[in-house]
Amino acid sequence: MNAATEKHQIAWVVDLNKCIGCQTCSVACKVLWTRDDSEKAQWWCSVNTQPGEGTPRGWENMGGGYDADGKLSPGKTPTPEDFGGGFDFNHEEVFYGGSAGKKHLEPQAPREGRWAMNWDEDQGAGEWPNSYYFYMPRLCNHCTKPACVEACPSKAMYKRDDGLVLRDEDVCKGSKDCMAACPYKKIYFNEEKNVAQHCIGCFPRIEAGVAPACVRQCPGRAVFIGWLDEAGSPVNRLVHEHKIALPLHPEYGTRPNVYYIPPLSPHPLNEDMSINTDKSRIPPEYLEGLFGPDVHVALKTLQSEMDKRREGKESDLMKTLIAYKWEELLGPFTADPALINAAD
Amino acid sequence: MFVYSLDGLKIDGDLAKDVEIEDNEITARSGVYQTFGKLFIAPDAEAHQLAVDGKWPEKLREAAELLAYDFDFGEASLDGSVSAEDFQAEYIRVFDVGSGDGPPAPIVGGAYGGVDRRKKMEEVARFFEYFGLTTTPDDPRPPDHLATECEFMQYLAFKEAASPSPRLGVSFHRAQDDFLERQFVDWLQEFAAKVEAAETMPFWVWAAKTAAGFAKADMQHIRS
Amino acid sequence: MAPPPDKRASGSQYRDRWSWDKVTFGTHCLNCLATCSYRVYSANGKVLFEEPSALFEQINPDVPDMNPMACQKGSAWSQQIEGPDRLLYPLRRAGERGEGKWEQISWDEALTEVAEAVVEAIDLEGPESVVFEETVEGGLLTQAAYLRFAGLIGAVTLDANGLINDFPAGHHITFGKFSCASSQDDTFNGEVLLIWHSNPAYTAIPYAHFITEARYNGAEVITIAPDYSASAVISDKYVPIKAGTDAAFALGMCKVMIDENLYHEDFVIAQTDLPLLVNAQTRRFIRGNDVDNHAPEDQFYWWDTKTDALVLAPRDTLDPGAIKPALEGTWELTALDGSTISVTTVWELMRKRLQDYTPELASEICGVHPDVIRTMARTIASKRTKILEGFNTAKYYHGDLMERAMCLVLALSGNWGRKGTGIQGLALAGLDGYQLWGMKQKKGVMETIRVMDGIDDAMAKLREQSPDATDEILGYELLQRGLVSGTASPPAFFHYYHCGYEETWNNAEWSDPEMKRSFEEYLDDAVRRGWWGGLIKPGSGTDPSVLFCVATNPIRRQRGGASGLLDTLWPTLDKIVVVDNRMSATALQADIVLPAAMQYERPNLQYAITHSFSLGFSDQAVPPQGEAKTEWEIFSLLSQKVEEQGKEQDCLDYQDGRRQPKTLRGLGETFTANGTWSNEEDIINEWLQDSIEAGTLPRNASLAELREKGQIRFTGLGMFAPGLSLATDVKKDEPVTAFTWHTENFVPFPTLTRRAQFLIDHPWFAEADEDLVKHKNPPQMGGDYPLLLTSGHSRWTIHASAMGNEVLAGTHRAEPLATLSQIDAKTYGIEDGDLIEIRNDRGSAKIRAKVAGRIMPGQIVIYNGWEPHMFEGWKGPNSVEPGMVKWLHLVSRYGHLRYLPFGWQPVPADRAVYVEVERLSS
């Protein structure tokens, strides 16, 4: 396949049964791309506890995307307060200011309405012993029908032949239309530079055959990357063949290309602390609200393949998900970054 | 964390420096390397005479008398018409300095295997140091010079033979195996090939090929 | 299939960001028990970012490889090099201790001042008044530096594990060792994984994938915890349990296994003391000197059902051979004095004990439903089960009982010494070169062999005295021999005599109500009997004078907080010296602060652990920031200064605590062995070479090799006891599985009975009714208050090391939190984000609340690592922790219950402290 002439779609598959919410993906991205002071509060990749308000706060209720008729339906433009974070601290005062214990180290931000990227970490929903939560990494979905591209008045946002949705910061006028249009609210705004910023799909790495940082650094080995259209690739098979990797909020209409394998969960407890094997801890409706009605079949498939293994039978799906060799997660992007002289 | 202390424990005496040992197959190996060592330094008048008399192969066979395996050292002599000065000049041309682009068959290990020369020398020097040898600063030869490496094998084999401590003997035996495998045998083969291609005196071709062959056979023997 | 390069202008900005001019390997050398291999990318002498190198080879095609081996903390380490808490210059306090006023001084001035204090202390009180806290951070070159200095001058080093308490006493009581950790990839081989008293989703991030992969491979993953933890999220089953009741739960499962005949009889008979004979009356082992004038005291017996007679239980093998030892029965025995003793087995005693732990009775204690207890017992008995334990039980007052009960579960179900089984913890093995180096006077293999021959000699002599002892047992003996002349001391005594814990530990309300005597009586008894002879330093009669905290942070960690050290020890010290790379809580309270180089700024090795079983190597990417120096350089210079001061103060020759002559003459030269050990790369290389000689590294191991590959897998356990404790063969193509020597080769355990021991017939244990394992409620530590404060480690930091990292702070609320359930929050009128106070009779602290459905009502959780200076008044949660010590850990001279460095000793508890809470404001 000649990438220069044919269109591809790069896609991520995130296995929520392996994600442990460690934030290594978020940090990998941040340390690489958003270390400027003006980017302090930006987390192009973020991991939130679901259910939760996430980042930006309450994003699932901010609208955007397309309506049922396929028309662009811009929603709220998230504010810096919605994103929160980017705190300053008072190290100087505490360590060297002769405070004698009277000042302590803390974020220097108003407490009222304070928020941050992962503020509601590990809170979830429900009450002990039947509370439920799981982790969901989010990044730009590099949608097939990107609302941000359609909404952008200056054509700064564009979709490449490899499926990445990128932006030209020299062209961007800072209108923030993309931020209102994106239903996932994964676009940030740089006040200093007056441009929108979001996950760039690690394109310099992709171009060199190196997997995106979020994928390559994930200690949980929870993320697959590859060409969605490449038959036989793990990404392709998980989405199209096994049908267990699902889009997030498909009803937003943008056809996102980050897919999720939905999370199983241990059964809840009855009042007497016996295990209620009839019920699911995470309400199926909740997962359906995230991933659509296909989620039920996906969970069933997952469980039955796991059961196969428990009975000692083979399972191609489980083999794929285990990924005995870490490189299997990287698709065609197996190049070692250290062996590339990127200073060229 | 814990640190062991041997305070209060008796440790048996130090390894003696000079030991009288009976000749055996290990001292034989040591002797062969010693001879090769002498063969590959810049030849003086005595070395020249030995070459002309065809005595080098004999010296090697003498040293190898108690060798535990068969090895054919062959025959070779220097054409009597070659003077001692010409003999030395040829050594320098082929192995040492060359004429213009460097010698056709460099006599240092670091020039082979595509490895960074400095790193190779550093490795070799550390190897020597760990096993109790340092090259003196006055020594004109770098640590990865063929003659120096032969001397090192001579030393290691001797130490193995002379070791009163079985553990130490094993250590030196392993060191030889390691050194042969990682530092010596491979580049010697390349070296011999280069000497053959260098259009030089048959004597040097014999010397290089014999040394390369011996090192290879010796490594096989050590492992059995 | 490369996509076309993006031509648009802003593309170049990002390409520039992803560029560098230098790549080095790096690791972080922290106490996380990971040896991640990162690549560090720098440009123009500045570290830019890092990324795991992911070069681990797949060991076995049926087991996932270890890649990428990383966590978010390592991935943000670069942000700490120039972080806001980084120490760059030597500092002297300019006001009171803790005032936060500093004067920047020169290294020369700083070291002179420290040296002055050291020599003065030696002169006036002796070298044991110079005290070091041992550390587990900073890697080997950090530790090597101060340990060497301390050893040369005869100072005291407080045992690291006695300070931090990662010591599962129950493992040690059972196995005679606590380092039982198979390599983490062995987890994949488990059929049942019990996440019990641990939270690997938080604390074993680089390895957690083996759990999720095992689950996909058919394993059942079960989390047993009070809270629905992040690890429960990735489990098949969540078993809520009341905090501190795990022994009851475990014993309930044991009862089921025995009642339903599910236990593995052959395994039990061979591996444990359960078939050994005891006096049915006294519950004491029948010993050699009970029945035979010529038999040693530590000879034990079986009843052979084949011959219906008393037989020796062999001391040199676990294999019963032709003997069929009974588990059940009672018999009559004639003692030496002619009297008749009724004998039975430990098994029978255990069965009787377990009558109190039917599933119904156990359920009343622990809250787990009896059916769950039954189901789990049946499952565990029939499948390869591994307990993924952390170091949480160790910090419970009765943690040893919980651990012993867990070990009993494994014993009955045959679950150690084979793939995918066992109990995790720690195991140190592989870098023998580091141990050997401590005994060498010069470089090179001859010296190495001389030392190794010396050790062989010493072992041979010990073997003469104990011909049936294993190498491991002799190894511990050897370790013990070096103790009295070494520097290590169990810190419990230091805390008791010099830090005010005498009062704390004698608080009966906070101790086990079943104690028959006061703590003081037990301690005095132990001391009088010489059980800790030569190890109590500085003794009660020596006032500590100089305290060194090299890469340690006692003000944060010490249970008791300010009242633990600041009010008691601090005022008595003449000089407090902190060597660290960040301004820690302890540095804030010090007199002299010396800036240390960080990882990435110097070559270093991490201490060797079996978790990854690979060598952790960190290279120098950039020079140390500011005027920071490596610890090796610091202590080299300090040695010179101390020698100078010795001359100045006319105190050059003196005696150490054992009246052995010590001298400061030539200290500067001695420290580096006349320049032999002045280059840190040379030191590392020597460690590598010597490890090759010891057979624990492959022959190509060298600094050059490490610079190419980043890490090397160990090839053997080594020749020293801690490594040997893993008791297994290291195979190139298999994960490391602990204890196979015991199960496959029937090699005895290093315990009194040479078996996994479930009866501890020591009088103190007996009078506490803990000779056999049982459940005991956590004592009312802190007083009579309604909420139980527990802890664990967070995902956000390794201890306090990331507290100044602003990128990591952005992944959570960036301030200390106490998490409680909605039910309790409602009861106390607390809302998420409110400022609350936690209080008990020990102290108080103010903290922000987080409300979460995962927390068990009745419990409040504050994770480890918050610095006191992140709290109002600098009072952290350790203010409410009394730091109680269980008196039984003072027992010594009972077989395997005796001090070992990093091992058996009294340790401080901090989990399950009782508090009350009050809302202060929103």
Image (tube, coloured by chain):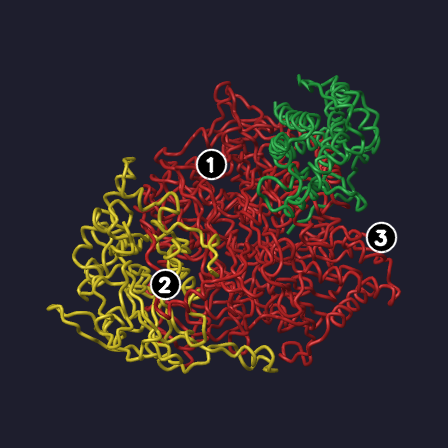
Q: Nearest to the eye among marks 1 and 2: give it.
A: 1
Q: Which residue is mark 1?
A: C734
Pick whichever of labels 2 and 3 is earlier in the sequence.
3
| Numbered tag placed on residue C661 in the rendering | 3
Q: Which residue is mark 2?
A: C855
Element at badge 1? loop
Q: Amino acid at mark 3?
A: Pro
Q: Amino acid at mark 2?
A: Ile
Q: Nearest to the eye among marks 2 and 3: give it.
A: 3
Pick whichever of labels 1 and 2 is earlier in the sequence.
1
Give how far across and how far down residue C249 sits, in percent. 39, 48
Whether callout 1 and callout 2 share a subunit is answered yes
Between A287 and C921, the residue placed more toward the observer is A287
Q: Quadrant of residue C334?
A: top right
Q: Residue furthest right?
A: C650
> Which of the image's four quarters has the C terminus of chain B?
top right
Give above or below for A129 relative to A90: above
Identify the subunit bearing mark 1. Answer: C
Residue found at x 51% / y 48%: C425
As measured in the structure, the alpha-carbon distance from the residue carrying label 3 to the one carrying label 1 is 50 Å
Identify the subunit bearing mark 2. Answer: C
As measured in the structure, the alpha-carbon distance from the residue carrying label 2 to the one carrying label 3 is 58 Å
Label count reads 3
In contact (CB < 8 Å): disc 3 and disc 1 = no
Q: Left or right: C27 with respect to B101? A: left
Q: Is residue C424 visible?
A: yes
In green, which chain?
B
Give how far across and how far down residue A115 sits, in percent. 36, 75
Identify the subunit bearing mark 3. Answer: C
Give how far across and how far down residue C152 sits, in percent. 77, 54
In yellow, which chain?
A
Colour of chain C in the image: red
